[in-house]
Each structure stands twice: as C-alpha cells, then as structure tokens.
Amino acid sequence: MMERQSAQSGFSLVELLIAIVILAVGLLGLAELQITATKVNAQSESILAASSIAQEVIEEIAALDSDDAMFDVPVANANTDNFLSVNDAAWDPSSVTIAGAGTYNITYDVITRFHGVTDLCQVIVTVSSDSVVMSVLGNRTRTVTATTIKRAT
C-alpha cells in the first residue's frame, strides 16, 4: 500500500522569500548594533585617556612645592576676589600621544587667592583631543577638565 502525499506539504517559494527577507532585516539590525558598539568603545577610550592625562597632571601639580613660581600672586582681577596667575598655559609636554587613543593637548589655568583666601590656589587642567574622535552623536573633539586646590606660600 502506498501512501499518497498531500499537495500541501513543504514550503512555497513565496514563503521562503519572506523568511529570507525577515532574516536579512534582523541581520542588518545586528550589523548596526555592532557599528554603534564600536563607536561607543572609541568614545569611552578617548575619554578615559584624556581623564588619565588630566589626573596625572593634577598629581604633578599637587606634588610641586608651595613656593613654586606657578603660584605667585599677580595683579588682581577688579571684578572678583580671585587673582588670575596663569591663563591657558601649555603644560610641558604640551601634547601627549597615546597609541590607539590619539593625541591630546594639555593646558592649565591657575587662580591665586581663590575666593579671596590668601595662599590658596585653584588649578584647572584642560585636556582636549587634537582631532575629532568617533562618537555615537557624531565625530567631535573630546575635552576633559580636572580641578584641584593647592595651598601656596
């Protein structure tokens, strides 16, 4: 006895094409997710590098003697109790290159007599990427600012 197969068994060509289209749309979404993950990774790497550089410079400044020339009191700003000692000065070295993370420029500001307090200095270190860095929101320059307060004599 032979069993007769139904004409309804198997997939039609249209059903197969629809399944392939659905699979392709899913794979394209996965590819976009991979691209976004790569951009976020580059962004976080550049921010981490800039933060590390800023922290290192802050630690070097904190280790300076309190009578260093950096902390000398200049002419007062007439509008505030703060005295601007150094403005946008380049740190030595003024740029640092980190393999895989780019080149970063380092500048700093020193405010002496911070909030009118004698022998109190605020140091603001700014580290910015030399070129645009890949980001989820578009390529742009990365900037990190670190601040410390130092007692000077």
Image (tube, rainbow, N blue to C red):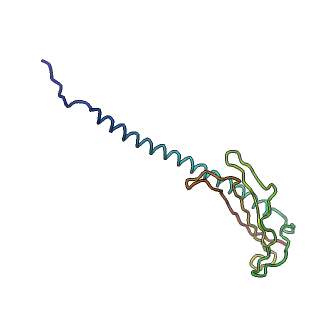
Q: Position of residue 76 (x, y in %)?
A: 81, 79
Question: From the viewer's perspective, is residue 50 above or below residue 76?
Answer: above
Q: Is residue 64 left or right of residue 11?
A: right
Residue 119 placement: quadrant: bottom right
Q: Quadrant of the C terminus?
A: bottom right
* 118 horizontally vs 101: left or right: right
Residue located farthest toward the top when viewing the structure as drawn: 1
Tell me the quarter of the picture where residue 128 sits.
bottom right
In-image side of 151 versus 100 (left or right) = right
Coordinates of residue 1 in the picture (x, y in percent): 12, 18
Residue 105 is situated, as x and y percent measured from the top left of the image, at 74, 56
Q: Position of residue 66 (x, y in %)?
A: 84, 68
Q: 59 or 95, which is in the foreground?
A: 95
Look at 63% across and 50% down and name the residue there. Answer: 45
Above or below, comparing residue 24 to residue 151 in the picture: above
Q: Residue at x 14, y 19 (%)?
A: 2
Q: Residue at the left extreme?
A: 1
At a point 32% along the width and 39% down the height, the residue shown is 18
**Horizontally, is 109 left or right of 100 in the view?**
right
Between 91 and 139, the one nearer to me in the picture:
139
Residue nearer the viewer, 109 or 54: 109
Total marks drawn? 0
